[in-house]
Image (spheres, helix red, strand yellow):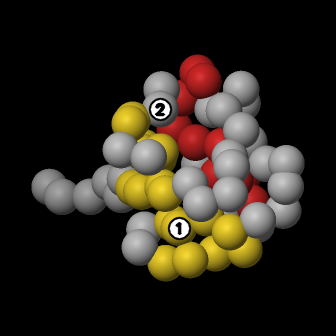
Amino acid sequence: MKIVMNGEEREVSSPLSLSALVEQLGMKPDRVAVELNRNIVPRGQWAATALSEGDRLEVVHFVGGGW
């Protein structure tokens, strides 16, 4: 199925949950925020949130640093 992630179209397997997508991307779940179709999805709901054809996601990965 096709989704749009951070403005780029991607082909992903179906069915796929939000938590499985984050895992496939190799990101640490505690350092990621996800917006699905303009709604922020709480981390506790990722496993139960199934992705669908045409979904639009914004995935933000937090990086530590500074002084």
Q: Secondary structure at mark 1?
A: strand
Q: Quadrant of the C terminus?
A: bottom left
The residue most toward the top is 44
Q: Which residue is mark 2?
A: 41
Of discs 1 and 2, which sits in the foreground? 1
Q: Position of residue 57 (x, y in %)?
A: 48, 55
Taking the spot 68% from the left edge, 46% from the top edge, the residue there is: 51
Taking the spot 85% from the left edge, 55% from the top edge, the residue there is: 14
Q: Position of residue 63 (x, y in %)?
A: 36, 57
Q: Position of residue 47 (x, y in %)?
A: 72, 30
Residue 5 drawn above or below residue 53: below
Q: Position of residue 21 (x, y in %)?
A: 70, 53
Residue 6 visible here:
yes
Amino acid at pointer 1: Val
Q: Which one is in front, 21 or 51? A: 51
Q: Quadrant of the N terminus?
A: bottom right
Amino acid at pointer 2: Val
Q: Earlier in the sequence, mark 1 or mark 2?
A: 1
Residue 19 drawn above or below residue 5: above
Q: Which residue is mark 1?
A: 4
Question: Between marks 1 and 2, how big is the CA–CA gap?
Answer: 16 Å
Residue 31 visible here:
no
Taking the spot 59% from the left edge, 60% from the top edge, the residue there is: 54
Q: Which one is in front, 18 or 61? A: 18
